[in-house]
Amino acid sequence: MNYQSTRNNEILVTSSEAILQGLSKEGGLFVPTELPKLSESFFKDIIEKEYIERAVSVLSLFLTDFPQDTLNECVTKAYSGGKFENGEVTPIAHLLDGRYLLELWHGPTCAFKDMALQLLPHLLKASSAIQKNQKEIVILTATSGDTGKAALEGFMDVSQTKIIVFYPLDGVSPMQKRQMTTQKGDNVHICAINGNFDDAQTAVKSIFTDDRLKETLENAGFCFSSANSINWGRLVPQIVYYISAYADLVANEEIKFGDKVNICVPTGNFGNILAAYYAKKMGVPFGKLICASNENNVLTDFIKTGVYDKNREFYTTTSPSMDILVSSNLERLLYDLSGSDDKAVSGWLADLNSTGRYEVSDKVKAGLLEHFACGCCNSEQVANTIKNEFDEYSYLLDTHTAVAVAVYNEYKKKSGDDKKVIIASTASPYKFTSSVLCALKKPDSTDEFEQISELSALSGTDVPQPLLELSKATVRFKGVIEKKDIANEVLKVLKL
Ligand SMILES: *Cc1c(COP(=O)(O)O)cnc(C)c1O
C-alpha cells in the first residue's frame, strides 16, 4: 500500500518512507491511498487472538513494505515484557447502561499516548533499516506534559536513536516535571526552557528549519525526526485498539457480530478519534463517533457548522491535554471527506494560516454530520461527573475521560440514541490526582504524593506502579536554558 500527501496527492511514498519522513515536504500529512476493508473472516480470526497478534494482523494491512518478522518483533517489544500493567494491554470496564470504558492508560506513563509511543520507536528504526538510512535518528520534542514523557519512555535505550525533550519551565504540572526529570536511559536528554509552552514549541520548530544546524548534524551522521502525532506511525497503532475493542465485546458476548456500537472520544489534536473513523471506514460496525471537547470547543462548533475558527479565547482547564485550538489531524479527515481533494485541503489550511478560519464545502459538511456527533463541557461539569460516576458505580474517572462521559450522557439524553458505546478512557485518574481528588472532597494535604495516598484510600483503587516509584526516583536532569540557546544545547548533547 502507498501513502499520499493531503496537500499534493501526486506525492506517493511507501509506509516506511512515510514514517521516516514524518511530514511531507510541502507540509501535508501522509494518508493511505485507500483503506483496507476488513472481511467477516478477518474478524472471526482476530476474535480468537491476543492483543499482540491482533495488532500484527491489523498493522500488516497498512505497513506493507515491512517484513512480517520485523512487524512481529516491533509489536512484541512494544506491548509485552511487563510494560503494560497486569499484561492486559487495553482492558474494558463496563459502567452498566451499555457504556464500556476502553482503558488505554495501563502503559508506563499512565496515559493513552503510550499505545502509539511504545510502538513508534520500533517502527521508526525498522523504517530506517528498510530505507537503508545510515544516520542516527535524533528525536526532538517540545511538550506540555504527556507526549514528552511517553516519547521518552518509548525511545529509552532504543539503539540508533537519541531523544531530546524540551519542556516549558512554567508550563507543566509538578507530577509531569518529576516524570520527565527522573527519566532513565542512556540516549535521553531533558531540558527546561525559560518560558511557556509556545516558547518551547517555537524554539524547537526553529531548529527544524535551521539549515546550517541540519547540515552540521548530517555531516556528523545524524538526522532529525519528530514524535508528534502528525507522523503516520503514531496514528496507525491507534486503529488497532478500536478494532480490538469491538472484537472483545463480541468475544465477551456483550454484542453480536454486526451490532452497531457508538464511540465517544475526549479530543484534542484529533488523533485518537480519527483512528476510530478509519476503523469505521474499514468496516467495523461503528455508529456515531462522538467528539467530546472541554471549554476549548473549536471542534464542537466545527462539526455543527463546518466553520473552523480558532480566533477565540484559550482556556486553561482541568483536562490540559485537550487544551488546544489547532487540531492538526483534522487535515486527514478533511482530505478523506472531500474525496481526496488536495487542492481544497491546501486552500482551507492556507485560510487557517492567514485568517485563523476556514469554511468547508457542503460535501464535507454532510460527511461530518453523517459520521460525527459532538459536545463540550466545562470543568465544573467534569468535577460533577467524576463525583456522580464514582458514587453510582465506584468507578474513578480521570478529568479527560470525564469530559467524554459527561458529553456522552448528554448526547444519549438529547438524541435518544441508546446503542451501546465504547468510551475512550485516556488517562489514569492518578495522573491528575489533584483535580480528581478535589472533585470528590477537600484534600487533607497540598503535597501531590500525599494526595495520591489519600485518593487511593478513598477510592479503594491501586496507584499505578510507575507513579508510585516517582516519589523515590532520583532527579537526573536539572538544566534550564533560554530559548535562544536551544541549538547550542542540541549540539552539546550530541557532543558536536
Ligand atoms: C493527548 C490526550 C488527549 C487528546 O487526544 P488527541 O489524540 O490529541 O485528540 C486526551 N486525553 C489525554 C489524557 C491525552 O493525553
Image: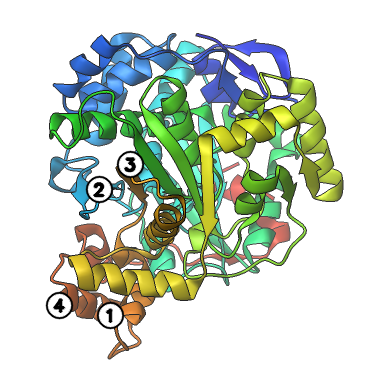
User: 10 Å neighbourhood of mark 1: few (<14), some, or many (≥20)?
Assistant: many
Mark closer to the chain start, 3 or 4 = 3
In this view, the mark in front (3 or 4): 3
In this view, the mark in front (4 or 1): 4
- Tell me whether circle 2 and circle 1 mark residues in contact (CB < 8 Å): no
Q: Is residue 325 left or right of residue 99?
A: right
Q: Secondary structure at mark 1?
A: helix
In depth, the one of 42 and 470 nearer the eye is 42
**For mark 3, what is the residue?**
419
Q: Is residue 311 left or right of residue 173?
A: right
Q: Secondary structure at mark 4?
A: helix
Mark 1 CB near ligand 1 (8 Å cut): no
**For mark 4, what is the residue?**
457
User: 10 Å neighbourhood of mark 2: few (<14), some, or many (≥20)?
Assistant: some
Q: Secondary structure at mark 2?
A: loop
**For mark 2, what is the residue?**
98
Question: Residue 47: x, y in percent?
Answer: 18, 23
Name the residue: 59% across, 30% down. 223
